[in-house]
């Protein structure tokens, strides 16, 4: 897959990005990992495959004794530098072979500085900023003794009922691959021995996002063609970006849990992709093979996972308890164990842990550095998506305002704005929208606040009167609605995607005051806003924007920042449409606008075939509420003059495309131009559109720019019916536009 958008587009200096000089540990003479392996006993080898949870009391004697005895290869959830160094000293100086520990932590969208949730980062469509955020996160984590993060999560997520869509980059394989690769580079830099580099982990391999009914940990049944053309490409991109580790998912894929799925791990990851990194289980997922019903007992589970290629068992003891007897009894070969151990030792070597096992916090920038704060605000700003802006309600002009109402359960929710997977961020660091707006106007403009509801799920309407009064007394009502952070993330799935609690009722009451109403939604997923959209003059989707949600949102609302965001995921009109996503198949009976007769328009006594016979829902049609790639700007752009360098290309050729973009509005603005293709006929049916590139353009009013793209056969390639990867000759359609709908279109032919 060619990722044309993997550069650092914002040009922050290497210093700003805190990629400090590549201070490499001084080389010391030591055993090669193979020589070290040869010295290890079977128990010491098995010890390297054990990852212990160190969130309790890791300095307790039994924990230290396990480390001293060489029974622990890595730890998870220990982020105090001194404690980490103490444990490391026991491993290096008191165990027989002195093999250092690896320390792991979920640094998903920040460590102490919290960036937008990954779904929000995806809405920025900015690989450079995503990479820089990962860089900052890695420095903060490494400062605290962390060597390995369990990110990027690159599960394709088409189901907003699934709580973990919050951790993903959305529904598109190209965008997810591009951003996942950026995050890998940000965490790892060019060399894991660089100062502040940490090992990345592409997860959850694979197909987790297809959990049935959006219920976490549920079964996934994915035909191989779909697996290879939708769910695997972002993992392939992460591997090609050099991801040092992979994590297998909890779920069963077509009846075989990923933790024991040798097709995924040995045939595809290690065989076809030649991945030589490390594979870690998910939390206790080895022993869960028994619960799944794949294995009779933990011993069988240890055998199944080790045979499938899972090197480290996270937070479980099946390997520790059973691998020795499995080897002694000949059910697992020592060669298998040696291969697993070498993967662990190689990761420690790549991280430079043999030469430099200890953490020196003072060698790193402080947590929440100025560079970190600025970047977190920038990325939060660019993650905001303007979905509605009736009569150019936004940006607000403070000079025309005499008072502002700030309302809603998410207006001053310091913890919730951080989102899910925030282990090391502090709510006290948060700058909420209320705080930012008050700070911005001080005494110059009255800012009245009423939460209306104490938290997002609340049905207590006791605060409505105050909120309505505050709105009625103000020129504009900024209403912050959405989800508490606990309502998304792992194991937090919802079957009803409307605004929780009595938020819709609150909004309706505010709307009745006649005050201009601007809604800002903070949530970990697309919500179904179909029935509430009419109560908003403007809608900004903020996801969970992190520590600096407030300043980012305030800058956008008052015009100090332009809308950059585009949707990385489709917004359904109703839960019943799910799964609904842009890159769907055409079917043999695609719905055409004219044919659609919606349920309320059906004549009484309608004859069975009178409604046409095509693929749509009688009550919702087939279009989503907002499509993938959609996002408004504060100006207006037109496209013209789509040109192709040819209307047919050889397999080894290149196709150039260009299109003129003009800012016909009254203010400078930024637009994201997207390139889509459709393979009209293939050995497999192909999606109606596939994103293949995107470019950002900022233009002054009246200015134009010609945007150029290039396509080669690699961009047109897919996993074909015969399982080979490549393009197929034939006709292609191409679109250049500003969302996955519409745009300028042309056709070309790829010759055989
Ligand atoms: C969790 C998650 C995984 C995470 C791991 C360690 O259950 O599935 O994404 O990295 O355990 O916390």
Image (cartoon, helix red, strand yellow):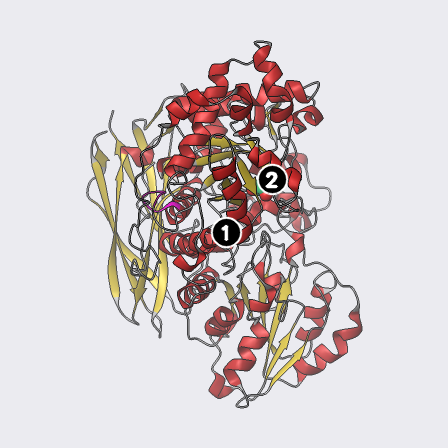
First in sequence, mark 1 or 2: give its number: 2
Give the x, y percent position of residue 251. 61, 31
Give the x, y percent position of residue 412. 63, 71
Check residue 429 for magenta coloring. Answer: no
Q: Is residue 654 left or right of residue 625?
A: left
Most foreground residue, 381 or 301? 301
In this rendering, the answer to whether 698 lies above or below 247 is below
Determine the CA span between mark 1 and mark 2: 36 Å
Numbered range of the magenta stretch: 188-193
Other residues around mark 2 within 10 Å, as few (<14) / some (14–19) / many (≥20): many
The quadrant of the rendered image in which ligand 1 is seen is: top right
Q: Is residue 203 left or right of residue 428?
A: left
Label 1 sits on residue: 118
Residue at 29% x, 64% y is: 662
Instruction: For the N terminus, give its image quadrant.
Output: top left
Check residue 192 for magenta coloring. Answer: yes
């Amino acid at each position: 897959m060619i990722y044309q958008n993997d550069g650092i587009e914002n040009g922050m200096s290497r210093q700003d990005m805190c990629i400090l000089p590549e201070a490499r540990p001084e080389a010391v003479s030591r055993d090669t990992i193979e020589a070290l392996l040869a010295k290890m006993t079977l128990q010491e080898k098995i010890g390297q495959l054990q990852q212990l949870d160190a969130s309790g009391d890791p300095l307790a004697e039994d924990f230290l004794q396990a480390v001293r005895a060489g029974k622990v290869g890595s730890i998870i959830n220990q982020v105090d530098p001194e404690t980490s160094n103490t444990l490391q000293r026991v491993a290096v100086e008191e165990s027989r072979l002195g093999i250092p520990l690896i320390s792991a932590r979920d640094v998903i969208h920040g460590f102490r500085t919290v960036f937008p949730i990954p779904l929000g980062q995806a809405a920025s469509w900015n690989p450079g900023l995503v990479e820089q955020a990962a860089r900052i996160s890695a420095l903060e984590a490494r400062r605290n003794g962390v060597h390995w993060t369990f990110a990027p999560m690159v599960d394709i997520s088409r189901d907003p009922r699934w709580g973990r869509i919050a951790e993903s980059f959305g529904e598109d394989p190209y965008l997810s691959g591009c951003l996942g690769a950026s995050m890998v580079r940000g965490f790892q830099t060019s060399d894991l021995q660089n100062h502040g580099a940490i090992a990345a982990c592409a997860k959850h391999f694979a197909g987790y996002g297809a959990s049935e009914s959006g219920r976490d940990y549920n079964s996934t049944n994915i035909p191989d063609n779909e697996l290879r053309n939708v769910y695997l490409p972002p993992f392939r991109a992460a591997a090609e970006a050099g991801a040092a580790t992979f994590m297998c998912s909890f779920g069963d894929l077509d009846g075989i849990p990923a933790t024991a799925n040798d097709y995924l791990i040995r045939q595809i990851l290690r065989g076809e992709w030649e991945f030589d990194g490390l594979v870690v289980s998910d939390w206790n997922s080895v022993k869960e093979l028994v619960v799944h019903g794949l294995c009779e007992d933990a011993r069988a589970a240890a055998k199944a996972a080790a045979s499938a290629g899972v090197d480290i068992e996270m937070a479980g003891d099946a390997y520790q308890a059973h691998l020795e007897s499995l080897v002694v009894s000949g059910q697992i070969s020592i060669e298998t164990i040696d291969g697993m151990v070498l993967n662990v030792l190689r990761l420690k070597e790549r991280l430079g842990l043999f030469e430099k096992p200890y953490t020196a916090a003072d060698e790193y920038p402080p947590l929440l550095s100025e560079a970190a704060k600025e970047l977190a605000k920038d990325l939060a700003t660019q993650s905001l998506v303007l979905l509605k802006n009736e009569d150019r309600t936004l940006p607000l002009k403070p000079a025309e305002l005499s008072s502002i109402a700030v309302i809603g359960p998410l207006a001053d929710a310091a913890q919730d704005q951080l989102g899910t997977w925030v282990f090391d961020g502090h709510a006290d660091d948060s700058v909420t929208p209320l705080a930012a707006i008050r700070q911005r106007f001080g005494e110059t403009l009255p800012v009245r606040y009423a939460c209306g509801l104490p938290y997002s799920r609340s049905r207590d309407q006791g605060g409505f009167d105050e909120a309505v009064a505050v709105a009625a007394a103000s020129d504009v009502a900024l209403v912050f609605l959405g989800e508490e952070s606990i309502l998304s993330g792992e194991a937090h799935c919802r079957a009803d995607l409307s605004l929780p609690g009595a938020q819709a009722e609150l909004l309706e009451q505010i709307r009745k005051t006649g005050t201009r109403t601007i809604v800002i939604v903070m949530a970990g997923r697309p919500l179904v806003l179909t029935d509430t959209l009419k109560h908003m003059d403007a809608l900004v989707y903020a996801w969970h924007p992190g520590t600096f949600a407030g300043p980012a949102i305030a800058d956008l609302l008052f015009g100090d920042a332009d809308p950059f965001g585009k949707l990385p995921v489709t917004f359904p009109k109703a839960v019943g449409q799910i799964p609904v996503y842009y890159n769907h198949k055409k079917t043999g009976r695609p719905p055409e606008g004219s044919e659609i007769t919606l349920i309320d328009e059906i004549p009484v006594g309608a004859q069975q075939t009178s409604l046409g016979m095509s693929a749509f829902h009688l009550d919702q049609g087939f279009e989503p509420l907002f499509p993938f790639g959609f996002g408004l700007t504060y100006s207006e752009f037109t496209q013209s003059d789509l040109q192709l360098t040819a209307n047919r290309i050889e397999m080894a050729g290149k196709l150039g495309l260009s299109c003129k973009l003009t800012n016909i509005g009254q203010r400078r603005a930024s637009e994201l131009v997207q390139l889509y293709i459709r393979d009209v006929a293939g050995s497999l049916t192909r999606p109606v559109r596939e994103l293949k590139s995107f470019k950002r353009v900022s233009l002054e009013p009246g200015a134009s720019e010609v945007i150029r793209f290039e396509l080669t056969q690699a961009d047109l390639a897919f996993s074909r019916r015969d399982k080979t990867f490549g393009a197929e000759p034939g006709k292609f359609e191409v679109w250049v536009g500003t969302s996955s709908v519409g745009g300028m279109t042309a056709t070309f032919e790829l010759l055989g």
